Image (tube, rainbow, N blue to C red):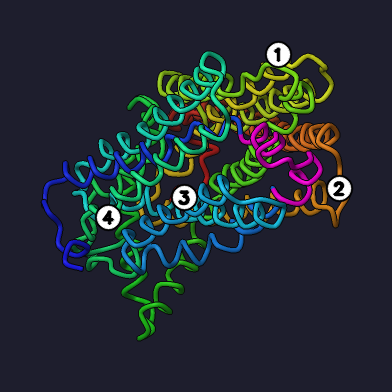
Amino acid sequence: MGCFRTPPSHSWIYPTVVLCLFGFFSMMRPSEPFLIPYLSGPDKNLTSAEITNEIFPVWTYSYLVLLLPVFILTDYVLYKPVIILQGISFIITWLLLLFGQGVKTMQVVEFFYGMVTATEVAYYAYIYSVVSPEHYQKVSGYCRSITLVAYTAASVLAQLLVSLASLSYFYLNVISLVSVSIAFLFSLFLPMPQKSMFFHAKPSKEVEKPSYTNAALDEPHEGEAAGCGEEKPTSVIPTMSRNLDDGWLSSPRPKNVALRVFVQWFQDLKECYSSKRLFYWSLWWAFSTAGFNQILNYVQLLWDYKAPSQSSSVYNGAVEAIATFGGAVAAFAVGYVKVNWDLLGELALAIFSVVNAGSLFLMHYTTNIWACYAGYLIFKSSYMLLITIAVFQIAVNLSVERYALVFGINTFIALVIQTIITVIVVDQRGLNLPISIQFLVYGSYFAVIAGIFLMRSIYIIYAAKCQKKMQSSATSQNPYVPHPEEPGDVIMGTKL
């Protein structure tokens, strides 16, 4: 067991390389773009209704049930065991996909895939326990970029193997099994961390470093340029960390470590969500992510409905590769756009939510598979662009610990919403709607989101103009009054 506890190297390069290799091979799964043709084809011979209403909902339910326990366990056991658990879950998932038969077995597959997605948090949190603060931004960018590269490469490879080599979908799953097995082997060579963000955190004097909290600005969006953060004064960030520690020391501390951590989590969440700005960005994140995950889960079924894979050429791999690349480019471009997000951010959320709704309506009403593909490309690219903005707006003034906490709760809320949608729209105990009608519901869902944020953005812009007019009037009457602040500073509200 010594290899699990003694790091082979104390350099940040070794764990980064091993973690990136794990991320690459865990995402190098060429079978995923062709999952529905595989399940509905001669290998598994499942009907569209069985896949839609009985099998796929299990992933949503298992992900929801496992997320919070795994989130807590990840920090408590110091990340690496959970990464190993993810590797094991990958292997079980693809073994069952290859050799299992029937609805019940495929439901077990979805449960273990729910375990895979729930344990994904360990992959992104691991770097904060083994890498020094000055390398957070760089290493986070590497780890996130490599998964994007791997997913794109897997999609391209899958399309080439299917279109040019006429390879069976079964062998795509064999390649995926080999890839995730290699990822599992790499997880065994990760150094065992000695600290974590919550349960095994360092004393506050050691943790309180501006570079540590500044890493939160760049951690979730490696594609953004530094200019994206210039509109926000970052000098408040170290102060926020000090306030967190002061509150910790001044309040009565429960003797039980776990109870103390939970009490601190509750206090942090209460303070974070008291900011209206953070609350509304988090609200959009949760609702949009719920809809986005639902689309990703069922879009292949819609494609198979529009152009059955048994009688048509399938280009799922190429579409996924282009959509992922387009989304990455859109997210990267955010860093070069100079916009007052405090004033116009929610208007952007409303406009792009309208775009999302329109693309989903197009996917529902069109009978042309290429138009359906185009709708998906627009939808995924616009979501990845907006989620990059949302992540930055939420993380800009949060320490790494608070960002991890807010991210976890937002993801959990998104899963709760997605579960409600699944129960009502998809599950055989609910409305049990066919896939063609589901996308009409999802388009309406994003239209409602657009309407909510459009009304709020109009209110924010109107309030900012009124505030500016009042300040201009006061300045003209009294020339000694300081010049009014910019609208972005006026409506900023409470900064964390």
Q: Which residue is mark 3?
A: 90
Q: Who is closer to the viewer here, 311 or 428?
A: 311
Q: Say whether residue 32 is visible.
A: yes
**SS state under label 2:** loop
Q: Position of residue 158 (x, y in %)?
A: 51, 24
Q: Which mark is residue 432?
A: 2
Q: Amino acid at mark 2?
A: Asn
x 15%, y 57%: residue: 7
Q: Position of residue 363 (x, y in %)?
A: 76, 23
**SS state under label 4:** loop
Q: Position of residue 133 (x, y in %)?
A: 21, 47
Is the residue under label 4 in contact with that under label 1 (CB below 8 Å)? no
Q: Earlier in the sequence, mark 4 or mark 2?
A: 4
x 21%, y 68%: residue: 1
Q: Earlier in the sequence, mark 1 or mark 4?
A: 4
Residue extent of the magenta highlight: 35-55
x 65%, y 55%: residue: 105
Mark 3 to mark 2 CA distance (whole Å): 29 Å
- In the image as oriented, which residue stretches furthest toward the bottom? 255
Magenta run includes residue 51: yes
Principal secondary structure, stretch drawn in magenta:
helix
Mark 4 to mark 3 CA distance (whole Å): 14 Å
Q: Which residue is mark 1?
A: 370
Is the residue under label 1 in contact with that under label 3 (CB below 8 Å)? no
Q: Amino acid at mark 3?
A: Phe
Crowd class of label 1 (few under 14; some 14 to 19; many from 20; radius 10 Å): some
**SS state under label 1:** helix
Q: Which residue is mark 4?
A: 188
Res 20 → quadrant: top left
